[in-house]
Image (cartoon, coloured by chain):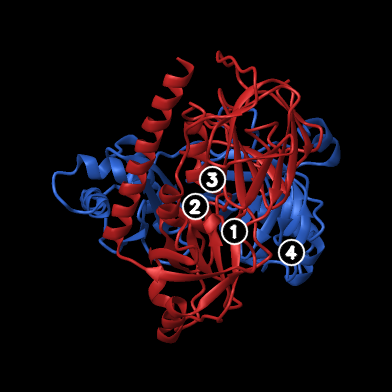
Amino acid sequence: MSIKILKPAMLTTLVGDGREGFRSFGIGPGGAMDYFAMKVGNYLVGNDHEAVMELGYAPAEFLFQKSSLACITGKGFTIHVDNEIFPLWKPFKIKEGAILKLIKTIPGAWAYLAVHGGWRADEWLGSLTTNLTAKAGGFNGRALKKDDAIEANESKIQIDETKILPWGISANELSGVYSPTNEVRCVLSIETDWLSPLSKDKFLSEQFAVSSQSNRMGYRLQGAALSLSERIEMISSPVDFGTIQLLPDGNLIILMADHQTTGGYPRIASVIKADLPKLAQILPAEKIKFKMISLEEAERELFSEEQKLGEIKMGCHERFKKHFG
Amino acid sequence: MTNLYTITPLNETAVLVSFGNVIEEEINRKVISLHRKLIQEPFEGFIESVPAYSSLAIFYDSIKIKSLAHSHQTSFYFVKGFLEKILEESISVGSEKSRSVLELPVLYDGDDLDFVAQQHQLFRDEVIVLHTSKTYRVFMIGFLPGFSYMGTVDERIVTPRKNSPRTNVPAGSVGIAGMQTGIYPQASPGGWQLIGRTPLKIFDVKKKSPCLFSAGDSVKFYSIDKTEFEKLNEY
């Protein structure tokens, strides 16, 4: 046994790289809400594509039943190990018997607990990530509960103390991903032109608050009601993580990691991939403002995000190798 | 193939080829032909394509395409060019392989069977005869893992969705929504008019190919009684 859940967060699941290639069967990729934090969590403990534990919205508590190399990334939480404050975005050794607490403090929604070797997760259709609808992948296809014991995969490294390690991600590197917090960039999508001219203006000039009816499937927004130039009944068509749909009541919903593969509401814009981590971390009641950019810019942002992740991975793996030989 | 289509970015990693905003078998054939063609002969960087009634989304690895491209053009531009070339080569719609018809048993005892019958001044048995008389096309799969949108039903049993969806529809339920018919692969909230249930698992996570249907398949229902249902019940 590796870790016991004394208290789960509001939603605690094992996540991994998305499940690609099955959308045509109604099975979406799923994966982390904040892919940046999930990936970097893995890199910081010397992993690459292993399963990570995703914790949302509420405090959580764990008992380590085996000494491990662990790390917590993400936003919105303060970490305590045996009542001592530990940093986020830095790997640490944690001894058997230690209690890890995540306390909800600052703004932010999701945290990621990674261990060296990765959490043992069921692979389904080529991915370790949990699909809660199909009840497959991850930990028995379900969210984690109090008293669940999660195993970590075999690890060769020796841990005999609780100690913070000397590498991590700088505040500067993070601000590029998560700031400015309230600005979410998007590109045009399929039915953008269906919006009335006034609604198009409002979409880009008004602020929208994330509603409390938000979850891993979608973030509902509250704000100015938008409308179409004319009423057009749309038939179902594919959607994606980041697709912004206009609901019949004039409100917007942004589809998130566990979105359905198809939808029947107009797709008026798409949040760019590089801004999905930032968007995922926005809490209900917080406000966002959309900024339209060109497809060229969105592609460039995606490219530089990927480059950044590549550099972080290389840096982390070098430090890991040097430290553990 | 006619050039009555549009290619528009869904976002920076996906495009949508749209053949209109209608539910028509002929149009869906074009969608499925393009889908199958892309699976057979994908471009470098192709991830997957997702067929819907009259549109196909193509998801791609934008970074890979960019690194392979020789010019400064966007990945979208490259994918669009590739798709236009295929679409011009006229995918022969007739080439859609006629797969065998999947026959599916249904116990017609749904909670909305009486409502559907009353709506159209039919007897329950007439609704069953009409529902089992046609071979349906699987237009697309979406909404839930394995939920297939089939159609179109005989116009004498076309019935709109319920005004207020049920909070829990059991897995295996067979329903009607407008001119569509379909089966709930998992228990879920839902607004379709329930006319019966199949004892067979149409979606099974334990199977290598979990979904019994693919878009483009043909399905026919046949009526069974309670004893047969119990014998066949996989749930």
- Residue B118 horizontal/vertical position (percent): 79, 69
Viewport quadrant of the C terminus of chain A: top left
Residue receiving disc 4: B165
Please report, as a chain letter, where disc 4 is located. Answer: B
Q: Residue at point 67% right, 69% down?
A: B160
> Disc 1 to disc 4, how far (Cα)?
19 Å
In the rendered structure, which disc, 2 or 3, sits on the residue that comes first in sequence? 3
Q: Give the camera-side residue of A102 and B189.
A: A102
Asked whether, in this view, residue A253 is left or right of residue B67, the answer is right
Q: Give the camera-side residue of B30 and A116.
A: A116
Q: Residue at point 65% right, 62% down?
A: B177
Please report, as a chain letter, where disc 3 is located. Answer: A
Residue receiving disc 1: A218
Residue type, mark 4 in image: Pro
Q: The blue chain is which one?
A: B
Q: Are marks 4 and 2 on the same chain?
A: no
> Disc 4 to disc 3, how far (Cα)?
23 Å
Asked whether, in this view, residue B171 is left or right of residue B59, the answer is right
- Quadrant for residue A138, please give it: top right
- Residue A123 horizontal/vertical position (percent): 58, 27
> Disc 2 to disc 3, how far (Cα)?
18 Å
**Are discs 2 and 3 less than 8 Å apart at CB?**
no
Residue receiving disc 2: A277
Residue receiving disc 3: A28
Q: The red chain is which one?
A: A
**Are discs 4 and 3 less than 8 Å apart at CB?**
no
Residue type, mark 2 in image: Pro
Viewport quadrant of the N terminus of chain A: top right
